[in-house]
Image: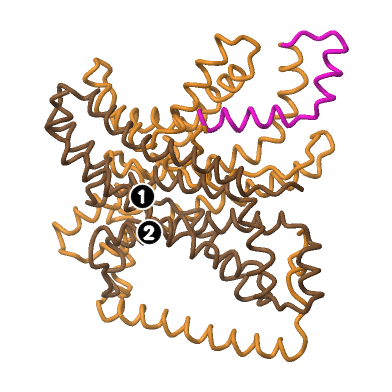
Chain colours: A brown, B orange
């Protein structure tokens, strides 16, 4: 147990970094992903095309490559993020937004067409139809998929370890170098830290889903 | 909401004109941004043909190195995919077993490997297994980590596939006097596998994406290869080819994955038209599974 006590500060900071990475990029990805989903169903054809292009590209690019580009690529056009942390948040948000878009779009598709038809019959335009009628119902049906995307995002933050952000996976590498004799304990501590994020999230998603579900 | 146009009225002449103007302005802004980026690249000397020529010049060894790296990437993905498919099928069968003593531990194994980030699994294989007396290199660690994670994901996909075969099929098979092994292998699995084919290919895309984690554990896949080439060239010529090599590695990844995605869509279209497959719903990977890198739901 002395191992945990000795490295408590490092583990705590790493845990908080992971959590902050996840929360910041989760919020950005949710906003960007919803915008993309709205673009994909919009009346303007170029917007639909642009959103489809975005989703296709990011769905087929490894997250590591996205990280790579934001960390080492954009320097060549004289751009740079202020800190490593923000680079990681940007990479995770851009990548996850594509999947949020897919989830939200499937939610939009699951809203009965009668709802949108009724909204249009009342004279609402596209923005009003989508914003006040369709999206609120769509979000209720995609609580579970969006929650799963969040959990996947929380686990994907581990890739930031390869790009000099000291989160849990980086702490794992550092601790395993220092405590070669207690490797199993190191791994158990890190896995437990991830489970502290994912298990309550899964439970909370279940609660929210039950609260918001609509019977059809 | 089957047709997308249910959300809006068909644009009239005035709306169409507005859209055209908006498209024009938006396109212009985009072109200016791209132009600005190209200009910055050009003024940093990144667009000189000589810098890009190195990618195609066999004398520099770069095409060969990327070829090897692509083979390495595909190799680890293929090994992991085959192993994960076999293990996933076994685990799915185990999870659907009638015996509690099989079902419970198998479920625990599946849920554990879905809940742990893939990178942690790979690092565990790389760092811990050698100390436990099992010699394993970066290739083995990457392949084993990918297998462990993907077998759990595939097990869930297979289970869903088997459960989604129409109930009547199973009941009819039992009514004909088949034993449960026969029902599974002769009736349920053949139908489930055909429906799962596009999903399996889509999972291969995810797996190929995840193999880029080899970069972090030091396996020579595309990214790590690009990095080592960059280090080599930087040592010889200074910071000349960095950007070009990274762009090449990224483009190869994207191209291979787009090809596989297109293949998955093609297979899906063919399956949907096939009456032998009792498919009703569209089969697609959940968004979180497509994220890879440790995606996948945690059980409630």
- Residue hosting label 2: B248
Q: Which mark is residue B66?
A: 1
Total count of labels: 2
Q: Chain of mark 1?
A: B
x and y, in percent, of residue B106 in the image: 52, 18
Q: Are marks 2 and 1 in contact (CB under 8 Å)?
A: yes
Q: Is residue B50 above or below residue A214?
A: below
Magenta run includes residue B172? yes
**Residue segment shown in magenta:** B152-180
Callout 2: helix, strand or loop?
helix
Please tell me if label 2 and label 1 are on a single chain.
yes
Position of B279 with respect to B297 (left or right) is right
Residue drawn at point x = 50 percent, y = 15 percent: B105
x and y, in percent, of residue A201 in the image: 45, 42
Residue drawn at point x = 67 percent, y = 75 percent: A128
Callout 1: helix, strand or loop?
helix
- Of residues B61 and B181, the one nearer the viewer is B181
Q: Main secondary structure of the magenta part?
A: helix
């Amino acid at each position: 147990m002395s191992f945990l006590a000795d490295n408590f500060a490092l583990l705590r900071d790493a845990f908080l970094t992971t959590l902050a990475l996840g929360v910041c990029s989760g919020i950005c990805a949710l906003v960007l992903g919803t915008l993309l989903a709205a673009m994909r169903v919009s009346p303007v054809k170029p917007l639909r095309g642009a959103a489809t292009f975005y989703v296709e590209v990011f769905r087929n690019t490894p997250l590591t490559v996205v990280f790579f580009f934001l960390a080492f690529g954009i320097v060549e056009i004289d751009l740079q993020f202020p800190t490593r942390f923000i680079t990681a948040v940007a990479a995770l948000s851009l990548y996850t937004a594509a999947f949020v878009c897919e989830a939200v779009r499937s939610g939009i598709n699951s809203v009965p067409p009668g709802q949108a038809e009724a909204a249009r019959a009342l004279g609402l335009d596209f923005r009003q139809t989508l914003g006040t009628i369709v999206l609120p119902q769509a979000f209720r049906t995609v609580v579970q998929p969006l929650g799963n995307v969040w959990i996947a995002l929380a686990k994907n933050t581990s890739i930031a370890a390869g790009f000099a952000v000291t989160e849990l996976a980086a702490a794992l590498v550092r601790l395993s170098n220092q405590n070669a004799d207690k490797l199993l304990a190191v791994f158990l501590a890190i896995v437990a830290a991830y489970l502290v994020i994912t298990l309550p999230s899964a439970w909370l998603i279940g609660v929210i889903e039950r609260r918001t579900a609509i019977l059809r | 909401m089957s047709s997308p146009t249910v959300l809006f009225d068909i644009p009239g002449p005035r709306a169409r004109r507005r859209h055209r103007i908006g498209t024009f302005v938006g396109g212009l802004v985009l072109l200016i941004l791209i132009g600005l980026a190209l200009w910055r690249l050009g003024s940093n000397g990144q667009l000189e043909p000589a810098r890009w020529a190195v990618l195609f010049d066999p004398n520099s060894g770069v095409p060969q190195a990327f070829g090897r790296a692509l083979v390495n990437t595909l190799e680890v993905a293929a090994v992991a995919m085959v192993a994960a498919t076999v293990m996933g099928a076994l685990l799915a069968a185990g999870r659907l077993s009638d015996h509690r003593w099989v079902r419970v531990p198998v479920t625990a194994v599946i849920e554990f490997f879905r809940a742990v980030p893939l990178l942690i699994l790979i690092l565990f294989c790389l760092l811990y297994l050698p100390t436990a007396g099992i010699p394993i290199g970066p290739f083995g660690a990457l392949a084993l980590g990918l297998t462990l994670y993907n077998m759990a994901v595939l097990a869930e996909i297979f289970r869903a596939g088997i459960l989604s075969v129409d109930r009547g099929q199973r009941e009819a098979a039992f009514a004909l006097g088949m034993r449960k092994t026969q029902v599974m292998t002769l009736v349920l699995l053949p139908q489930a596998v055909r429906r799962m084919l596009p999903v399996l290919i889509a999972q291969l895309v995810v797996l190929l994406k995840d193999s880029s984690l080899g970069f972090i554990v030091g396996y020579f896949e595309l990214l790590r290869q690009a990095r080592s080439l960059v280090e080599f060239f930087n040592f010889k010529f200074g910071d000349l080819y960095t950007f070009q090599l990274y762009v090449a590695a990224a483009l190869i990844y994207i191209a291979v994955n787009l090809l596989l995605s297109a293949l998955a869509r093609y297979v899906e279209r063919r399956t949907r038209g096939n009456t032998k497959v009792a498919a009703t719903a569209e089969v697609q990977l959940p968004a979180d599974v497509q994220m890879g890198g440790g995606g996948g739901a945690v059980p409630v």
